Every structure is written in C-alpha cells, then in structure tokens.
Image (spheres, coloured by chain):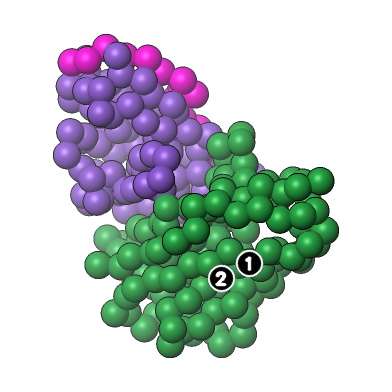
C-alpha cells in the first residue's frame, strides 16, 4: 500500500519570503501522480500543483514549484514571494496511474502554514 | 465550473441514529470518494466508487456504508452513529482518466 508522510505539522513564513514544505511517499509502482492541495479556512480543497512521475521536469505554477526526487521518493513544495492568502493547510497526495479501483487519492497528514505580515 | 455539493455544512445527530450524508456532482464524473478529516490525521479514505453501483472500501470503512444508485450521487451512511464518528467529512469526484479530483465544501458532523 502507498503511504504519504508529512512530518512537519506546522510552519511559518514571513510575507514575501520563500518557504518549502516537505513530503515523502512510499510506493512500489513506477507510474503515478503526486499533488499538493491547499485547504484554507473556508475548508474548500484546492489543487495547487500536480506532478507526473514519468516527467523528470519539476512542475511549476506561478509562485508554486515542486522539487520531485523520484529515487528518494521526495516531493516538496516551494512557495515563493509568500502572501497572506497562502496561509492554509497544505496536503501532499499520491495517486496511482492505474484507473478504476486504483483511482483513490492517498493523503498525508497535512501541514499548517502561517504567513506573518 | 465543476460543482461538488454536499447536502449539509453542519450536522448534529444523536448516538445510535442512522445518518445520511449526501454528495452530488454535476460533471458526469465516474469516480466519487468519501474522506474523513481529523486534526493530526489528515484525510483518510472511507469508501470510493468508480462507477454506478460499484464501490471499494478505503482505509477506514468500519461503521460506514455507501450507496451509488445514480452516477451523480454518492451517499455515505452511518448505520448507527457513535461519538467517535464526530468529524469533518469531505466528498470528492473525478473523471476516470483524469488525475484531478474536485472536492465539496465538507460536512462537519457532531454526534452527541
């Protein structure tokens, strides 16, 4: 079974600074997807960024980028130029590339990010 | 925009009651999921369905059942609610071939 580990329960960053959130995972599969989701106080889960395991290039979405190390099974999220609106809980998630009964998302425990003005 | 709607945002039920949590999506998604979210535990999968009438147990199915009679609706049933089922419940859906899941706004259930 796949597992996703987020070992830091909380982090804090100064507005306009850069912060990196860590995630490791365990799987025996070679083809899969990794995600970072954001959950603000409104509770609405929002997809931040997605990485396909077969792609060596790290995904980037505006101020958000990932450092994907497949051999180390590491998937960290870097937030540049942090803004007050980035304050939220962030979840790392894994999904097999197989469909049907293997379509489930497996989440880590999440990390609460606070942004200091 | 994809919309995943959960029937209640807050719900208070008594111990022993049968509780229904409803989730409806409007984008013809094949996959639907029910997660439970607890502080320090993240999101844990209760059940998911990849087609009408098809269901798979997730990591914590005990005390729960599900129903998917129509493609757009996925119901989570607490057969006899207990206080340890007090939690936030999140529904999600996705296309079979898509990697992106869309979430509802969550139902905070309190069992007293």
Label 2 residue SS: strand
- Quarter occupied by the C terminus of chain B: top left
Q: Is residue A9 left or right of residue A20?
A: left
Q: Is residue A10 visible?
A: yes
- Are the residues under marks 1 and 2 on the same chain? yes
Residues rendered magenta in the picture: B4-16
Residue sitting nearer the eye, B17 or A39: A39
Chain ID at mark 1: A
Magenta stretch holds residue A11 = no
Instruction: From the rendered image, report the letter of the chain displayed in green.
Output: A
Q: Which chain is purple?
A: B
Residue ID for mark 2:
A76
Q: Is residue A68 above or below residue B71?
A: below
Q: Is residue B11 magenta?
A: yes
Pick whichever, A86 or B18, lies toward us: A86
Residue at numbered disc 1: A20
Residue at image position (25%, 28%) is: B84
């Amino acid at each position: 079974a796949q597992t996703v580990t987020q070992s830091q329960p909380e982090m804090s960053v100064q507005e306009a600074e850069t912060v990196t959130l860590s995630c490791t995972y365990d799987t025996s599969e070679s083809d899969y997807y990794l995600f970072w989701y954001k959950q603000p106080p409104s509770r609405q889960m929002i997809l931040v960024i997605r990485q396909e395991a077969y792609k060596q290039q790290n995904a980037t979405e505006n101020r958000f980028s990932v450092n994907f190390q497949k051999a180390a099974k590491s998937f960290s999220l870097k937030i540049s130029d942090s803004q007050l609106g980035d304050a939220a809980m962030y979840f790392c998630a894994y999904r097999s590339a197989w469909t049907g009964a293997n379509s489930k998302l497996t989440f880590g425990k999440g990390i609460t990010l606070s942004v200091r003005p | 925009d994809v919309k995943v709607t959960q029937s209640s945002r807050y719900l208070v039920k008594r111990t022993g009651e049968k509780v229904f949590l409803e989730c409806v999506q409007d984008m013809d998604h094949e996959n639907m999921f029910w997660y439970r979210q607890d502080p320090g535990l993240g999101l844990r999968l209760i059940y998911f369905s990849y087609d009408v009438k098809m269901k798979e147990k997730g990591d914590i199915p005990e005390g729960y059942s599900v129903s998917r009679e129509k493609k757009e609706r996925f119901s989570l049933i607490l057969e006899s609610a207990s206080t340890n089922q007090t939690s936030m419940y999140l529904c999600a859906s996705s296309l079979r071939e898509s990697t992106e899941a869309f979430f509802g706004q969550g139902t905070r259930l309190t069992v007293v």
